[in-house]
Image (tube, rainbow, N blue to C red):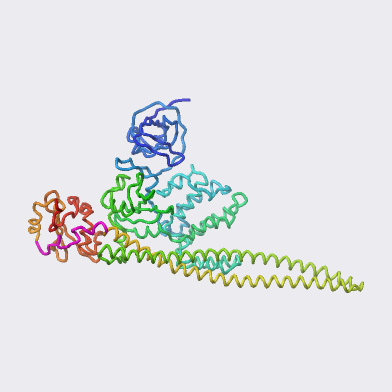
Amino acid sequence: MGSTDGFQYRALYPYRKEREEDIDLLPGDILVVSKGALQALGFKDGDEQTPNQIGWILGVNERTKQKGDFPGTYVEYVGPVKISVPSHRPRVQRPLPATPGAGGGRLPEALEQVSPLPDLQDQFSPPELAPPLLVKLVEAIEKKGLDSEMLYRTSGSELRQALRTDWTLGDLEPFDVHSLGEALRGYLQDLPSPMVPVAVHGDILRVLQEIPQPENCRKQLMLALESPAVPLQNTLTLQFLLRHLGKVSQQAESNNLHPRALGEIFGPLLLRLPGAREEVNEKLRDTPDGTFLVRDASSKIQGEYTLTLRKGGNNKLIKIFHREGKYGFSEPLTFGSVVELITHYRHESLAQYNAKLDTRLLYPISKYQQDQVVKEDSVEAVGEQLKVYHQQYQDKSWEYDLLYEEYTRTSQELQMKRTAIEAFNETIKIFEEQCQTQEKCSKEYIERFRREGNEKEVQRILMNSEKLKSRITEIHDSKMKLEQDLKKQASENREIDKRMNSLKPDLMQLRKLRDQYLVQYSMMDDEEELPHHEERTWYVGKINRLQAEEMLCGKRDGTFLIRESSQKGCYACSVVVDGDTKHCVIYKTATGYGFAEPYNLYASLKDLVLHYKHTSLVQHNDSLNVTLAHPVLSQPPAR
């Protein structure tokens, strides 16, 4: 075996493999990497000395002899070395973990930058027939072949994992048809809105329940999809996808993807209801960095949550782990509650977990909701109202769950009755064919027996004929009764669906109210004793700049006051920074008080003061790296 140039790296931190292609690291491990492998990825001479800039690196751990990927942020460069010629494999981009900090551990799969797909209307315009992303995926799938039994039935591919954070499709040739199929399903799942809008779901459901004839059903479905509620791009994309699925079903003998199987796979993707993710994206749209909210984790594990944080114009998802009564972003879990965790990171940066998260939890989402309803002033009153809304939410959820169980049961019964009606139709068809055959044959026998004078046999043949006709009539009657029951039950099923849909807005509103009060309660609980709550400690009315400077002379950094500004309708904040007094204007706008757009959000000067008690003014002015820590007229704490 030949040799080639390579490089050595030394592991600085422990790393436990998260994927099959990764390798484990312990501090001190020596790793060897092929120079050719780095050059194949586009890196130049000298780049090998900064592994944290390379990203994920393919190499061999000399201690364990494992070969695979390791993060460049976990190693340091040692020097050049001669190594045996390695094999090469195609790679895709994946998020790189940050260098572990001294104060905390890694975030294993806890952080994911959302690179959202735009709506279909923003992805293409006629005369194009479908989004370029979807066209590229479909063409690649059809080129690879549609006869695989695992097509559209696999999960966990490397391509899909990469596309969760970056929908830039590069060369698809290295990927097999299963990975491409999963990526196509992921594309449909990641669309901000379902391809078939929620507004027409009810019409589609009614057509499917009430029109059993396939041809009539198809026509009515096409009419429903021609509704003004369905954008043209959605219709064109659906038609493009259905043409592809038609080709897939033509290979059903090989791939076992009959129309019913394809419906089970793609139906929930095309007709999906808006869920928590869409609701969160809508709430965080156009909000400044530092905006955040907490919701139940998609894992559905009791006690786990997802923190969604706005940073760099994108949404960052951070999983909040829960184990043995403790919460945190990574081991060791140290917080006694989610509220305690949120309160901590309102003061401390998240950069210790990820270098790119150099922000704090600045703005709870409720600050940006126009229908903010928390009016109570005391923590006790907010707590009592929180209990009320929480109970109402639980009651509505219980009512919805009962309806959902009933809806599921009746839907299954409806399907069984439709199957029974199909069976009746087949049975009637068989009996009618038997009746026709018997009548044809019995004429000859009746004439023969009458010539022979055998009236007994004639009567037996006529009696059997009547019994057969009577049996057909009974089957017809049973079928009609079943059809009537089906129609009645379908009507009841629609009523249940209407009641469920009528509950959904109430549920969402109650959850919104409950969450607003929860956030407000957590904010008030730890700030109830602050002197900032007393306006008399910081509001000094109509004084000028020189008088303000005299009041603040010799005070410690962070001492501040609020006064009327010389600008009409505005106020001014005077604060001590590095021993000097600085002044900045507070604007009063239709949306609230603030130092600048889009931060003019606070309902009162008191709300603004309480916020900037914990948040630096540096985001508005580089020379104001200070918080409003000490009201000028408050009593200093006893020593």
Extreme right residue here? 452
Q: Position of residue 404 (x, y in %)?
A: 49, 64
The answer to whether residue 196 is above or below residue 95 is: below
In-front residue for pair 489/402: 402
Q: Position of residue 517 (x, y in %)?
A: 32, 62
Q: Quadrant of residue 29?
A: top left
The answer to whether residue 100 is above or below residue 570 is: above
In-front residue for pair 315/423: 423
- Is residue 596 rendered magenta in the image? no
Q: Residue at x 81, y 69 (%)?
A: 440
Q: Residue at x 60, y 53 (%)?
A: 250
In-front residue for pair 261/462: 462
Q: Position of residue 492 (x, y in %)?
A: 53, 71
Magenta-tinted stretch: 525-543
The answer to whether residue 79 is above or below residue 143 is: above
Q: Residue at x 37, y 53 (%)?
A: 306
Extreme front residue here? 639
In-front residue for pair 48/45: 48
- In the shown orientation, is residue 420 left or right of residue 9? right
Q: Position of residue 330 (x, y in %)?
A: 36, 45
| Numbered marks: total | 0
The answer to whether residue 9 is above or below residue 435 is: above
